[in-house]
Image (cartoon, grey):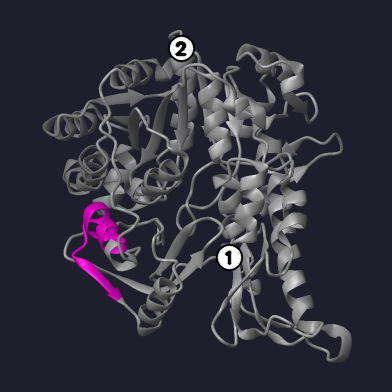
Amino acid sequence: MLTDIEIAQSTKLKPILDVAKSVGLSGDDVECYGKYKAKIDLSVMSRGGKEGKLILVTAITPTPAGEGKTTTTIGLADGMRRIGKNVVVALREPSLGPVFGVKGGAAGGGYAQVVPMEDINLHFTGDAHAVGAANNLLAAMLDNHIFQGNALGIDKERITWKRCVDMNDRQLRYLEDGLGGGKNGVPRKDGFEITVASEVMAILCLATSLSDLKERLGRIVVGYTYEGKPVTADDLKAAGAMCALLKDALKPNLVQTLEGTPAIVHGGPFANIAHGCNSIVATRTALALGDCVVTEAGFGADLGAEKFLDIKCRFAGLNPSACVVVATVRALKMHGGVAKADLARENLSALEAGLPNLLRHVRNMREVYGLPTVVALNRFPTDTDAEIALVMKECEKLGVQTVLSTVWADGGRGGEELARAVVGLCDQKSEFRFCYDEKLPIKSKIAAIVKKIYGGDGVEYTPEAEAEISRLEGLGFGRTPVCMAKTQYSFSDDAKKLGAPEHFTVTVRGVKISAGAGFVVAFTGNILTMPGLPPVPAAEKIDVDENGVITGLF
């Protein structure tokens, strides 16, 4: 059996200018990065004409068994193209950390991939590096300001801005720097986040123009003065230079699927510690080019989809037409208590025990957000007819259609039935609404997410979180959406509570303002903004030969 990278390397790609022409773009609209990648000019997203239908692909709570959300997203787009739809797929960029750490990336899999997958999974067009450079420029200017006399009176014990790097590196979580005395800086406690958790990445994904980007960068709060006043990037006169570093990174990237469907891949914040969506400019550009746009949000629907709908759609004025919830029999059996090694055996009782996870996600999309919804059951060879029938029966009780998807093995052909179901949903009326009013107090917004989306009973706050919420609201930062930093493995803040847990509380241990992004971040459980590498990093299997051919990348 061919690996994902072998499938990708055996596919003859279209020149990127041909892909651009297929959606009405001229050579003046794109900037080529080699033969198969290009940047799209920002002016494209504001072109007139009828805006396309927006389809969100999300998934059940992830498990080690895999769900195939990105693969389904790509295969669905290829399937829609096969049935005659003018479709564009809009995806997030992978982060190098997971690529070298725990998995091969986020370019899909099997015969439903975006290509060139090696480029996309590695440096791509350099957007992530630009984000890191802008982030760390601000950190350097902050510390230099303190070293040069600290005219703003910044309290070094209340600095909130961290450095970042696009790599899983636990060694960098907590540091003391500026050591050595004299001209070597001012000693202070510091630390790194992974680039995709940085506020700069969120800002890149939520900005709608260069001017908006610069304004958002300027609003970043880096810390507080001795008097408790917020200190911003504008106060440090850093926003202009940061924007200059991000000028090209703001332009969305054009690539293609294995079947030649245009794909815009741009921006990549994690959904468990950031807002988990590709950029507004990418989605808006796709909507200007296609009659249908298929996009995704990170991890399960309680994380990525919630943030896509409550944060991104709110800021961008987007109105999704339909939602696809991806599930697998294997993953649902894990939610029902089956070990990964035993998933190949039929187990209807475990499947029944795990099904509430899928059903809660479906109810959320339909009842909380008002979106027409279909379940995509990503089929594996070990799935039995009885197991598939059980999933379909339980979804039917909710009035939701379940469609089998075989896009991993069959590409777009395996997604045609799902494509037809989605087109049918787009013809229905969406009653899209938000989970909460952004003008509510911070605690009320967090409670709405916990009760309506997670299914919890309530929220507990540490004294530190209580104090910070009061302070942020006193400073005028309370009337924003909330970005929940929470484990991706459970509806709760306890990764071990699988399925659809009930009668739990979520503990908020801290909050911070991301003023440039425009939301408050609430930290729950033991969630970290800098992951670490596993005992056997994926990097051990990645290699390149003398001809530049990469192997081992997923």
Quarter of the picture holding the N terminus: top right
Number of marks present in the image shown: 2
Q: Any magenta on residue 455?
A: yes
Residue that numbered label 1 is attached to? 532
Say few, some or many: other residues with alpha carbon within 10 Å of mark 1 (under 14 / 14 to 19 / 20 or more). many
Q: Residue at x 47, y 25 (%)?
A: 293
The answer to whether residue 93 is left or right of residue 270 is right
The answer to whether residue 336 is left or right of residue 246 is left
Q: Nearer the viewer, residue 376 or 229?
A: 229
Q: 236 above or below 110?
A: below
Q: Nearer the viewer, residue 272 or 406?
A: 272
Q: Position of residue 349 (x, y in %)?
A: 16, 45
Tell me where the magenta segment starts and ends, as one range.
445-460
The answer to whether residue 185 is left or right of residue 476 is right
Give the number of the disc on residue 85: 2
Which amino acid does the dot numbered 1 rest on?
Gly
Q: Which image quarter: residue 52?
A: top left
